[in-house]
Amino acid sequence: MIIKPNNLEYSFITPNETSDFVASTINIFNQSYPKFLVHGIWEDPDSLVLFEIFPEFQFGLVETATQRMIAQANCLPLAWESRFDELPEEGCDWALVKGFEDREQNRKPHALCLVSISILPEYQGKNLSPYMIGYMKELAQSHGLSSLIMAARPSLKSLYPLTAIERYITWKDKKGLLFDPWLRVNIKQGAKIAGICFKSTTISDTISGWEDRVGMYFPETGDYIIPKGLVPLKIDYPNNMGIYIEPNVWLYYDLS
């Protein structure tokens, strides 16, 4: 599938179409997400399971002129027939566990869940996101899935870590549109907000581990604003622990 936003040509590829798909994916992922989120993630063998078990639901976007993969997305199918506003608070953490459990239990999937999407920094703002969303919708329908869901990480929430996310998602820009770009582009593509997943991603680490993750010193117990964090990090000296619990926004596309 070839797309031509802004008169530049790109094509979608799947893992079996290039030998360096996983390496390219990791490179894009590492450059696009905050360091504290990706810290040590690829050292865990389980981090590559999506590529092994659900290769048909992973894809990349290649720039034709350079043959460089400049964007990627990771999805997996889920068995979800309940109301979208009943999706759980655990968000991404829940989706990854449920997708593998559904497969092991031979449960028929109904929804495609996006768990990661990233575009190289120098290619962001080039109107590529709508095409990637469109590809995911077609991917879901081609596998007989009736919805596309995602625990969306609002792209500008890190600039306002002290603002409650339930207030943040109601903000509008000067044109009266949703303030957050990632939420806005999804709504324009037909998504609806199902609710907040307040515990979408939970990361627990030692205090020194967190200092390594974010390049900061935490001298005492308390809440700290960290680079690219959507909410403050909680440091607990008595237990030598730092806990970051990231809220995301459940979005859904009804494809039925």
Image (cartoon, grey):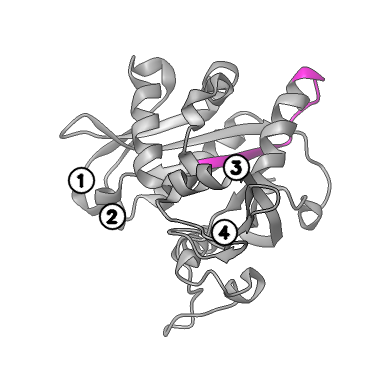
Are discs 1 and 2 less than 8 Å apart at CB? yes
| In the displayed structure image, the side of residue 183 where residue 72 appears, left or right | left
Tell me the kind of residue under disc 2: Lys
Spatial CA distance of label 4 from label 3 is: 38 Å
Tell me the kind of residue under disc 4: Gly
Q: Residue at x 60, y 18 (%)?
A: 53
Q: Earlier in the sequence, mark 4 or mark 3?
A: 4
Percent across and percent down for residue 186 are 52, 58
Q: Which segment did they paint magenta?
A: 104-116
Q: For the residues carrying marks 3 and 2, which lies nearer the camera in this image? A: 3
Mark 2 crowdedness (10 Å alpha carbons): few <14, some 14-19, many ≥20: few
Spatial CA distance of label 2 from label 4 is: 20 Å
Mark 4 crowdedness (10 Å alpha carbons): few <14, some 14-19, many ≥20: few
Q: Which residue is mark 1?
A: 8
Percent across and percent down for residue 17 are 36, 17
Q: Is disc 4 placed on a helix, strand or loop? A: loop
Q: Which residue is mark 3?
A: 205
Spatial CA distance of label 1 from label 2 is: 10 Å
Q: Quadrant of the N terminus?
A: top left
Q: For the residues carrying marks 1 and 2, which lies nearer the camera in this image? A: 2
